[in-house]
Amino acid sequence: MRPDDPLLALLACPLDKGPLVLLPEEGALYNRRLRLSYPIVDGIPQLLPSSGRKVDAVDHERFLSSLKASAT
């Protein structure tokens, strides 16, 4: 999955139905609000509620920094 993939705008978190952001270096989609990471396996997002991995505070800050850096 690429950051400019139009499918990314359609994907939503299965729990809060909010938008997800792509973390290409992690191979995952990320929900900042719930701090959940959903893996992308063979190009297919795994968006089952049970697939979400809780992200600790350190990784959350690292992800946010990465997103800010890629936005500039």
Image (cartoon, rainbow, N blue to C red):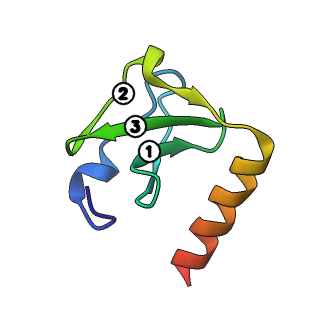
Marks 1/2: CA distance?
Answer: 9 Å
The amino acid type of the residue labelled 2 equals: Leu
Q: Earlier in the sequence, mark 1 or mark 2?
A: 1
Q: Residue furthest top?
A: 50
Label 3 sits on a secondary structure element that is strand
Hey, which quadrant is residue 45 in on the image? top left
Provide the residue designation for mark 2: 47
Mark 2 neighbour density, 10 Å: few (under 14) some (14–19) many (20 or more): some
Q: Residue at x 32, y 41 (%)?
A: 40
The residue that mark 1 highlights is: 29
In the image, residue 36 lies at what x, y percent?
58, 33
Quadrant of the image containing the C terminus: bottom right
Quadrant hosting residue 34: top right
Mark 2 lies on a secondary structure that is loop
Residues tagged 1 and 2 counted as in contact (Cβ below 8 A) = yes
What residue do we see at 31% from left, 51% from top?
A: 8
The residue carrying mark 3 is 39
